[in-house]
Image (cartoon, rainbow, N blue to C red):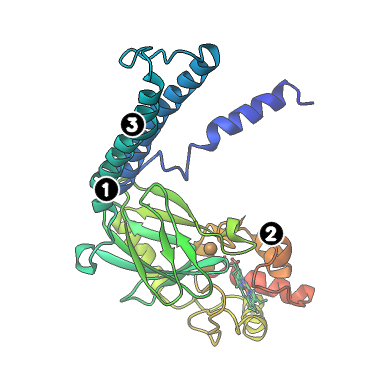
């Protein structure tokens, strides 16, 4: 049995589960606000309908011979009228009204933007189970962590390489499918600097739940500096151990990963040129710290079962050199 502290933490977890980073009810853009408002309107209407249904049900148990409704009364045939009113008229009117309201209030604000309408475009490609992020017009490529300038309309153009994924950052806008060979657009905008968590929203295999992403809304200056750094090739490894690490990398890892400025040009996994500029590894699965990085390289399957990166047979010194090298990819 749970003790008092146990119950308290369960209650807190339930209470806080809906809040925080990834909630549609904490919108940070106009489209997300429209969606949140629509959700509240739907909730209120549903609560009224649900309460009315419960009332009629209880009434039918207690007084099967009476409708108990003021307008319809207890005349003969009153039950037929009740069925017509609450079985046909009320549902038809409320559903049509909600349908019209939903289309008028939300659809126009969540439409895909025309390319010229937004200040910049970012290409986001989903693969099992991570996101590649490109900034057209620059050489910047990164993974899972998308930086945007704050208070700027940004077009996301999303596709997939394998199965259907879905790009979703609930605080910034609706979901949009990421399909193989069929680019889809959605606008994102953040009214405040911050980190907005997103998630693949289309079941796509064993690690679907660990296919997270994050949008960082930076001040324009910070964003510029970040993008300039991302566009550069890697800095040359500064120590002998790191140089050894680069060699190991080009032998063991280059078939799948790119590090711009080196011979590693693989396209299977994330671009690692500025690996240490990310906060997380494995699509937000683990923090990007030395110990986790070493653990990931040694045995990614333990950290993210089924991930498309195999465990490679590395010796202790090779791993050490690799980690020394990768820790400097800033
Ligand atoms: Cu997915």
Q: Is the CB of mark 1 within 8 Å of ligand 1?
A: no
Considering only vertical position in the picture, is 277 above or below 55?
Answer: below
Residue 50 visible in the picture: yes
**Which residue occupies the foreground of this view, 100 or 57?**
57
In the picture, the disc for residue 75 is: none
Helix, strand or loop for disc 3:
helix
C-alpha gap between disc 2 and disc 1:
50 Å
Residue drawn 32% across the image and 38% down it: 92
* Viewer-nearest of discs 2 and 1: 1
Task: Identify the residue under disc 2.
Answer: 291
Give x and y (percent) for residue 245: 65, 78
Q: Are marks 3 and 2 in contact (CB under 8 Å)?
A: no
The quadrant of the image that shows the N terminus is top right
Task: Identify the residue under disc 3.
Answer: 90
C-alpha gap between disc 3 and disc 2:
61 Å
Quarter of the image where one finds residue 141 = bottom left
Residue drawn 66% across the image and 76% down it: 241
In terms of sequence position, does the residue under pointer 3 or pointer 2 come before the other? 3
Q: Is the CB of mark 3 within 8 Å of ligand 1?
A: no
Residue 272 visible in the picture: no
In terms of sequence position, does the residue under pointer 3 or pointer 1 come before the other? 3
In the rendered view, does 265 fall on the left or right side of 182? Answer: right
Residue drawn 41% across the image and 12% down it: 68
Task: Identify the residue under disc 1.
Answer: 103
Considering only vertical position in the picture, is 72 above or below 118?
Answer: above
Residue drawn 36% across the image and 30% down it: 84
Helix, strand or loop for disc 1:
helix
**Which residue occupies the foreground of this view, 181 or 123?**
181
């Amino acid at each position: 049995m749970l003790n008092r502290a146990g119950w308290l933490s369960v209650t807190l977890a339930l209470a806080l589960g809906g809040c925080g980073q990834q909630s549609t009810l904490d919108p940070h853009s106009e489209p997300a606000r429209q969606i949140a408002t629509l959700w509240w309107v739907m909730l209120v209407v549903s609560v009224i309908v649900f309460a009315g249904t419960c009332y009629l049900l209880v009434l039918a148990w207690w007084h099967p011979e009476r409708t108990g409704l003021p307008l319809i009364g207890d005349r003969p045939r009153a039950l037929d009228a009740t069925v017509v009113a609450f079985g046909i008229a009320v549902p038809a009117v409320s559903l049509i009204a909600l349908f019209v309201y939903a289309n008028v209030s939300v659809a126009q604000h969540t439409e895909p933007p025309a390319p010229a309408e937004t200040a910049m475009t970012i290409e986001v490609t989903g693969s099992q189970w991570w996101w590649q992020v490109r900034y057209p017009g620059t050489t910047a490529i990164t993974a899972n962590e998308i930086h945007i300038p704050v208070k700027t309309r940004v077009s996301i153009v999303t596709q997939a390489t394998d199965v259907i994924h879905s790009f979703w950052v609930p605080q910034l806008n609706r979901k949009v499918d990421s399909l193989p060979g069929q680019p889809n657009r959605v606008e994102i905008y953040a009214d405040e600097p911050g980190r907005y968590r997103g998630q693949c929203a289309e079941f796509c295999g064993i690690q679907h739940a660990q296919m997270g992403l994050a949008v960082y809304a930076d001040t324009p200056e910070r964003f510029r500096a970040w993008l300039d750094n991302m566009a550069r090739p890697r800095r040359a490894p500064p120590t002998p151990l790191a140089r050894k690490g680069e060699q190991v990398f080009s032998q063991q890892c280059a078939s799948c990963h790119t590090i711009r400025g080196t011979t590693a040009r693989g396209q299977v996994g994330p671009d690692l040129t500025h690996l240490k500029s990310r906060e997380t590894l494995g699509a937000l699965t683990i923090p990007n710290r030395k110990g986790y990085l070493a653990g990931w390289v040694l045995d990614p399957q333990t950290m993210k079962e089924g991930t498309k990166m195999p465990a490679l047979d590395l010796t202790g010194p090779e791993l050490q050199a690799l980690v020394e090298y990768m820790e400097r990819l800033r």
